[in-house]
Every structure is written in C-alpha cells, then in structure tokens.
Image (cartoon, coloured by chain):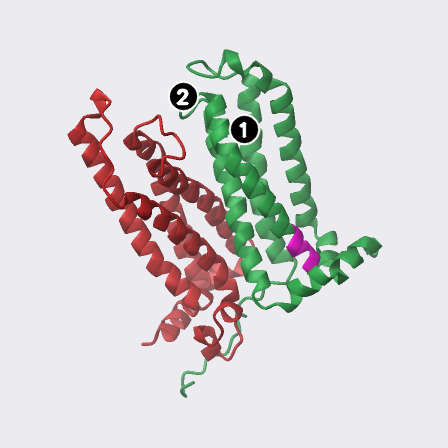
Amino acid sequence: MSLQEFAAGIQSTSLSTALKSVSWIVPTLQSVHILMIGVVFVSILMISLRVLGRVRADEPLVRVWNRFAPFLWSGVAVMAVTGVVLTIAEPVREFMTLSFRLKMLLLVICIGSAAAFGRSVRGAARVAGVATGVEPPLPAGVRLAAVATLVLWIAIIFLGRAIAYDTPVWGDWSPTVSLGGAAT
Amino acid sequence: MNAPPSFIHDIEASAIGEWMRGNLLAMPVVNAVHVLCVTLVFGTILVVDLRLLGLLDRGRAVTQIAHEMLRVTWAAFAVAALTGALFFSANATTYWFNPAFRFKMLAILLAGVNMAVFQLITFRGVAAWDRNAPTPRAARLAATLSILIWISVLVLGRVIGFTKSVEVTVPENVDFDFSGGP
C-alpha cells in the first residue's frame, strides 16, 4: 500500500468524514496547535538562550530547564493530539506533502534531542549538587547545539506552514504534483 | 456591500501588493514568518503574564522578567506587523470587509490599551511588589486580560485564513486514480 492509498484510506473513514463535516473543528484545532507553538517555541528559546548565557544567567541551568520543561512537554503533547486529529481530518493534505514529511522527521530529531538534553542537565545537576549552588560546567559543543536546536525548531514551524503551500515551495519535489497538481 | 475606500484599492494595486500576489514564494515565506512572530509575541507575553499572576518565577523580579521577555516581544511584534501589512497589501479589498480581520485589529488595539494602562498606572508602583511579594489585583487583572486578548488575536488570525478564501486546500472530492502510474 502506497502512502497515497493509506492517506486516501484514512480520508474515507467515517471519523475523517465526520471531522471534516463540522466546519469549525479544523480551524479550532489549528488555532490550539498554533497557540501551543508559542508555548513550546518560547520554552525552547528560553532554555537555548540560557545555554548561550543570554537570559537568566543568574539562575542555574537546571532551574531554567525545570521552569520551562513542563510547558515544553505539555505543549508538545497538546500539539501531538491536535496534530493527529488534524491529520485524520485531512490525511491527503498532510501525508502528500514534502513539508509534512520533513516536519515529522525534524520533530523526531528535536523531541529526542530535547529529552536527552533534559536528562543530561538534570543528571549533571544531581552530580554537582544544586543545593551547594555549584553550577556544573556545560559540555563542549552545547552552545552550537543550542543554536542548531533553535534553527531546527524554526524549520519545523516553517514546514508546518508550508504544508498549505507545498507545490509553490517545493515545485516538482512536492508529492502533490503526482495528484495532478490539484493540491497546494 | 459598500466599496472599500480608495486608499484600500491603492494599497492592493501598489507594487508591493503586486509583488506579493505575483511571487510564488512570497506568500508562504511571509506567512511562515508571520506565524513564527505571532507565536513569539504570545509565548513571551505569557511568561510575563504568568509572573504577574504570581503563578511562576515568584523568586524572580517582575522588572527583570519584563525586561528580558519584552525585548523579544517587541521585535517579534514589529516583524509580525510588517509581514501582516504585506499580507494585507496582497488582498487589501478582501481583508477590509472580512469580519475576522476587523475583530483581530480591534483585539490588537485592546491589547495595546490594556498594556498602556498597566504600564502607565499599575507598573509605576512595581517597586513595592517587584520580588517576593504578591502582585496587586490590577496587575493580575491586566495579565488575565492580556492572555485572553492574545489568544483571541491568534484564533481570529487563523479564522481569516478560512473566511478569506485565498488559501487553497485539497478539495474533498479530489479524484484518486490508482489504476495507472503517474
């Protein structure tokens, strides 16, 4: 089964049809999804800027992580739920775009790296002993990783928006071209 | 329906409007930058509002948080306004009559008034509650209003996309032909 058939299969389910038949469902889910971008991206921004020493330099990194991580993970969870429902409502619009596929790839990388980073920060803080106020030194390359993280999350946001413009953005690389150019 | 004022026509007929409509990549790029900046505005203001509500960062001075966050907020707001103006120029006459667009502009105005009132009146006494003290009721009210208004701005912005009929999505009746190859 091709991805196109898979998407068309979801689109023909009664759940997908039901979601699409109520006009306010998709805009509402998209709105919640976009609000959560603000929560998640600013959490990532604050943690990254703290690593770069640009904000909250007077607070230990682990405290900044603990302040923003709950927002990061709750936001990601809400975006996952709204994203899945949106994809069920419009599977062809999502799966048959290069933007969506790249976005999913980058999401796996970014969520994985955020989880690994959080574990490492908390682990290092435990070892160093936050109670003593000793800030564990940051490993080499972590500043570069912070910048890369910001670039990748911005790319995810851009790709999310580009789903609606897959053909103008990607031209012949867009799988929507194989749908007869009906979709953009 | 009345005709929009002539300056709205002029904006739409301008070289910038022309460029926005004619350039294939202009709309998606401007759109993505707009979304990025709007979410930055919302997210950074939320950090300040949650501090004003006394829910988070209580050990951190209100003035310090406001200083850190609002730099990003203003920069993002400026770019959001610029990209928003580019959008407007592409389809000014359509936007002019779009209720969601009008309510969104009204909501941004309300957010500005709320912020101005807070800044000019409530914030004057910040020294008394900057750190390790409960924030006054007026500050908590301003923060609550701010969160609600900015959520409205984002939702209304998304509604414009559905009521202005410029974005093209896959039609539901798209014909799938699996019999032959591409």
Q: Is B57 situated above or below B94?
A: above
Furthest-front residue in view?
A140
Q: How many marks?
A: 2
For badge 1, the amino acid type reads Thr
Packing grade of label 2 (10 A; few <14, some 14-19, many >=20) is: some
Tell whether label 2 touches label 1 (CB within 8 Å): no
Main SS, magenta region, reads helix
Packing grade of label 1 (10 A; few <14, some 14-19, many >=20) is: some
SS class, disc 1: helix
For badge 2, the amino acid type reads Arg
Residue where numbered disc 2 is placed: B58
First-in-chain label (1 vs 2): 2
The chain that hosts pointer 1 is B
Q: Position of residue B131 (x, y in %)?
A: 44, 16
Q: Magenta includes A91?
A: no
User: Magenta span covers which residues?
Assistant: B85-90
In the image, is B122 to the left or to the right of A158? right
In the image, is B46 to the left or to the right of B14? left
In the depicted view, which residue is nearer to us: A62 or A140? A140
Whether marks 1 and 2 lie on the same chain: yes
In the image, is B17 to the left or to the right of B64? right
Tell me what hue chain A is rendered in: red
Tell me what hue chain B is rendered in: green
In the image, is B87 to the left or to the right of A70? right
In the depicted view, which residue is nearer to us: A27 or B29? B29
Q: Position of residue A15 (x, y in %)?
A: 42, 61
Residue B49 visible in this rendered orientation of the protein: no
Residue where numbered disc 1 is placed: B144
Q: Position of residue B142 (x, y in %)?
A: 57, 25
SS class, disc 2: loop
